[in-house]
Amino acid sequence: MNTSDDKTTHFGFKTVNETDKAGMVHGVFTNVASKYDVMNDVMSVGIHRLWKDAMMDWLAPRAGQRLLDVAGGTGDISFRFLKRADQTNAVVLDMTESMLIEGRQRAEAGNMAERLDWVVGDAMALPFEDNSFDRYTISFGIRNVTRIPDALKEAYRVLKPGGRLMVLEFSQLPNAGMQKLYDLYSFNVIPRMGKLIADDYDSYQYLVESIRKFPDQETFKGMIKEAGFDNVKYRNLTMGVAALHSGWKI
């Protein structure tokens, strides 16, 4: 019988101890923090901005709502949320302090300081009371969590009744030929871009591998339902390169 110390998970295509993964992910994002936003633009040719706007369109923030943005890093999602509705506030939570530092240095952070909190924390053990938030978002972060079901259960716990979960994550293209072409781009171009722009090949190799290890749209939909959420739906973005998943705590 395995103990918690010898359970394994994946770190990209590598098999590692569960207890080691968080530190390895932390190392990746510490390394890329200063170039993270630039690399997002380069890797997606700016399309990630359209995906995040689509996320906000579906989320439809309303005045008075409180957002928890997990793996929120440099604050992209929280800034968009706060701009969409007055009298809202947001907590940006990330396990990597250097990502939060980069976020706090952005111009938007200064303009919205009284409506923003920045917290170092773990998606699998959120440092918040039950029923604390109206909305929970996680953008390009859930695939890096060691135990995704635990993170989804924590999301359910901290949301108020009537609260909503929304996940933006890279996903799978429905056409095998298109997926093959996308994989050729991902594995051959993105790590080289990482080396050129961020002087870090290995971190971006991991990020590409982690995308391929993440469950497809239907499988992930089932995981959200298993965590207790109702009315779970998803929308493909750019033919399935990314996907938005939505669920409600009823």
Image (cartoon, rainbow, N blue to C red):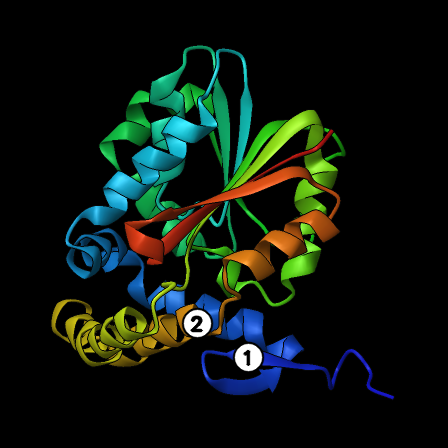
Amino acid type, residue under disc 1 in the picture: His
Percent across and percent down for residue 249 are 70, 33
Q: Is residue 226 visible?
A: yes
- The mark that comes first in sequence, 1 or 2, is 1
Which type of secondary structure does the marked residue at label 2 adopt? Answer: helix
| Most foreground residue, 90 or 179 | 179
Q: Is residue 234 left or right of residue 208?
A: right
Amino acid type, residue under disc 2 in the picture: Ser
Examine the image and state in which quarter residue 173 appears.
Answer: bottom left
Q: Is residue 245 above or below residue 201?
A: above
**Mark 1 touches mark 2? (CB < 8 Å):** yes
Q: Residue furthest right?
A: 1
Quadrant the C terminus occupies: top right
Q: Is residue 36 left or right of residue 148?
A: left
Residue at 49%, 87% in the rendered image: 14
Q: Is residue 113 above or below residue 228?
A: above
Residue at 32%, 78% in the rendered image: 205
